[in-house]
Image (cartoon, helix red, strand yellow):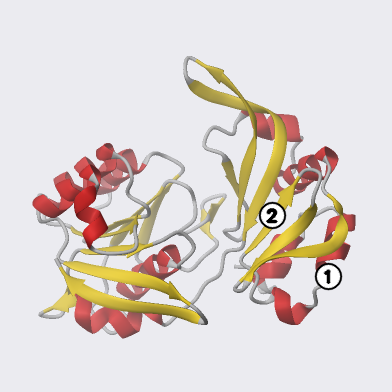
Amino acid sequence: MDKQMPWRQAAQILPRPLLEGLSALGDGRLESAEEYRLRRGSPMTVLLPEGETETGGPAVTEDHLRQVLENATQASAHTVLDRVRQGFVTLRGGHRIGLCGTAACKEGEIVTLRYLSSLNIRIARQIRGQAAKLLPELTEDGRIVSTLILAPPGAGKTTLLRDLIRVLSDGEGIGPHRVGVADERGEIAALWRGEPQLDVGRRTDVMDGCPKAQGLSILLRGMNPQVLAADEITDPQDAEALVRAAGCGVELIATAHGARKETLQKRPVYRGLLEAGVFRRLVVIERRRGGRAVRVEGL
């Protein structure tokens, strides 16, 4: 990633009036910023650990929203919107812009956004050292076992997943592994013209931008991985791909939305994975006032 502070790098795409308002909050507070939220007709806000805080800038306009996209992609907003199907754009450095507005659909699928109403710039951060502390509980006889990371949105499951991939790939505290990453949304490795912007290790191969199920299948067939990783399993096809991979002797690391182990049994896509015995360990992340708690359970 760029040597700039992540919050500064993500802020570079903001129009000058909004950037000036953001700067008024001060570097000290912005170092812990998680998101910049731009909603038409309201001042920009910053998501900090204590909650959303308004900046001192002007109300966000349609021109501001379009300029953010143009700055981020070096293309016209119209061109960008025509290729947005999943509601986000990944930036250099791993930051991601989520988009909302009026969708134009064809045969039930979104083909473009006619009007923008809001943007959410999620700030990517590389946090090393988390996985090393958990590794002894995630291994047997010196080998990683398939692990599911469970956490509510914004609790840091993707950050932990990335660090676990890096540790396994580089062989920190364990023998090095070949790791294949199905990075559908570009949040894990954040490829930029083929080069990872976030450190996922020297022995990691990444399939970026395609559906997870297809990415997992391509990696399994072509890259001979020892470990396969994917973020946010939500689709039955993703779960089926994981079951097939497990049957080929590959260890798996994935994440899921949820607050407690019990929630997995209530959702068919996760219940099927549990019944198939795909995962051996569960890492649960809980957000708490002033921080978070992480624990490992058996499955």
Three-letter amino acid code of the residue under disc 1: Ser
Note whether residue 169 is visible: no
Q: On screen, 268 above or below 44? A: above
Q: Are marks 1 and 2 in contact (CB under 8 Å)?
A: no
* Residue at 54% over, 32% down: 85
Q: On screen, 169 above or below 92? A: below
Query: Is residue 111 rendered to the left or right of residue 68?
Result: left
- Dot 2, crowdedness within 10 Å: few (<14), some or many (≥20)? many
Q: Where is residue 293 in the image (x, y as percent from the top left)?
A: 38, 79
> Distance between the Cα atoms at labels 1 and 2?
15 Å
* Residue at 15% over, 44% down: 244
Quarter of the picture containing the C terminus is bottom left
The residue pinned by badge 1 equals 23
Q: Earlier in the sequence, mark 1 or mark 2?
A: 1
Identify the secondary structure beneath mark 2. strand
Note whether residue 177 is visible: yes
Residue 37 - label: 2
**Residue nearest the observer in this picture, 180 or 109:** 109
Query: Is residue 70 rendered to the left or right of residue 195?
Result: right
Q: Position of residue 298 (x, y in %)?
A: 15, 71
Q: On screen, 232 above or below 75? A: below
